[in-house]
Image: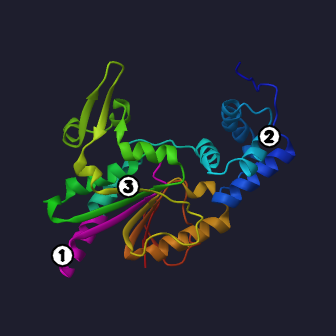
Amino acid sequence: MTLQFSNFELTDKEFTSLSRLIHEKVGIKLGDHKRELLKNRLRKRLNTLRLKSFSEYFKYIMEDDHCGTEMSEMLTAISTNVTFFFREEDHFEFLKSTVLPEIVKDKKRGGVKKIRGWSAGCSSGEEVYSIAITIREFLEDPTLWDTKLLASDISTKTLDIAVRGIYLPKALKTIPAHLVSNYFTTLSTDERRNLQVKDKLKSMVSVRHLNLQDKVYPFKGQFDFIFCRNVLIYFDKPTQRELVGKYHKYLKTGGYLFLGHSEGMAGHYPGFKYAAPAVYKKQ
């Protein structure tokens, strides 16, 4: 029998315990105005585990979630993974018109045709594959360039989608038909018609699980650009400053940081200069 939770409420104590745990693990700050969101997002998890209260759920995570599976499920549930190909299109236009020409000019002068980018908080992969398409469309001969894009997120479920690279046609509705045919293969089944990213894009992308709260990131090199859009809004101000400081460290001088349009830095982060709406250049 399926349990129903319409009569269950998230008490002050339960909300405090869960929100404190989430903040401790990934830095996401849930103020009291997020109480209903947390309750509604986690009810399905209680139902799946056949638990009777949020207190039981908290206890389950703390005592019985030995492999961290439910912790990942909880973080996936509370993260709003609203994304689609070429979301906030002006950023991809800026990448094509300003960032890539600077990179190509600089790398040709240095004799190393290498491009490195990072999609931090990549969700299900639409952003990083949009970046890959933009790069391939810009370069005269992409095969002559060593291009690698890191795609990272805390949600293993969305990362699985990024690895598979399979999407519904509606996710690609804003992409011109010639780009769809060039970069996607049609997968037809009895139930639906999906589109899969071709290997020439997949080969450019490395998908990794990464908690942005980790003190040390598992890479040593620097990136030419970093996309971290609509991620900082989940964190409190100290965590935001810490993350932007890390991005500054892992960006090459002259590299670009792309944020969401609601995440302006407002001059609080030295070392970056405004370049375009929600785009900042490392000084």
Q: Is residue 236 above or below residue 6?
A: below
Q: Look at mark 1 in the image and give the residue it sits on.
A: 108
Residue placed most toward the observer, 262 or 251: 251
Dot 2 alpha-carbon crowd within 10 angstroms: few under 14, some 14 to 19, many 20 or more: some
For this view, does 271 lie left or right of residue 255? Answer: right
Whether residue 201 can be seen here: yes
Residue at 69% in and 39% down: 37
Q: Nearer the viewer, mark 2 or mark 1?
A: 2
- Which labelled disc corresponds to residue 57? none
Q: Sequence-wise, which precedes: disc 1 or disc 3?
A: 3
- Mark 2 and mark 3 residues within 8 Å of each other at the beta carbon: no
Total labels: the figure holds 3
Residue linked to disc 2: 56
The residue singled out by tag 3 in the image is: 91
Q: What x and y, as percent, mark residue 121?
A: 49, 54
Find out whether residue 152 is within the magenta segment: no
Q: In which quarter of the image is residue 142?
A: bottom left
Residue type at tag 1? Lys
In percent of width and height, residue 259 lies at 48, 59
Q: In the rendered structure, which segment of residues is drawn in magenta? A: 99-123
Residue at point 66%, 59% (across, down): 25
Q: What residue type is labelled 2?
A: Glu
Q: Is 157 located above or below residue 280 in the figure?
A: above
Secondary element type, mark 3:
helix
